[in-house]
Image: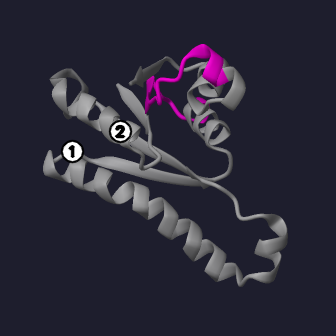
Amino acid sequence: MNILLAADGSPYAKRMLAYVAAHDEWLGSLHRYVVVTAVPAIPPRAAAVLDRELVKGYYRDEAEKVFKPIRAFFKQRGIEAAFVSKVGVAADVIVKQATSGPFDLLMMGSHGHGSLASVVMGSVATKVLANCKVPVLLVR
């Protein structure tokens, strides 16, 4: 099974990894794992006055902050995983990655807001559920 794990470095993403670790059926050599994270874009006017390599380095560093504990998680279990970082809006990046790859499942953490909170604040999970054609497993 090809599994896409959406991560943002939050406690909810860590809870998703704990869920994966607690369920042996999600770990193992039968699965292929790709971890995706979205780094918010620097406003265009700010990016225009910054050195291009500085901006690229910023995006790389922000992604690595998210990936570092997840790399350790997979390494500790002796499991290979690919890591993809994209610049953009989290929900859009996750949906695009899920639909562009041969994924059987998307796993992500959820803040667990009720429907009213989702209407008022918006939610990455809600937007992903509304737009993703790949099955989604939300971990609260």
- Residue shown at the point (64%, 17%) measured from the top left: 116
Image position, residue 75 (x, y; %): 19, 53
| Residue denoted by label 1 | 79
What kind of element bears circle 2?
Answer: strand
What kind of element bears circle 1?
Answer: loop
Mark 1 and mark 2 residues within 8 Å of each other at the beta carbon: yes
Q: Is residue 86 left or right of residue 79?
A: right
Q: Is residue 21 left or right of residue 124?
A: left
The numbered disc on residue 12 is none
- Residue shown at the point (68%, 45%) measured from the top left: 89
Image position, residue 49 (x, y; %): 80, 82
Image position, residue 1 (x, y; %): 35, 25
| Residue denoted by label 2 | 33
Part of the protein shown in magenta: 99-118
Please tell me which residue lies in front, 22 or 29: 22
Quarter the C terminus occupies: top left
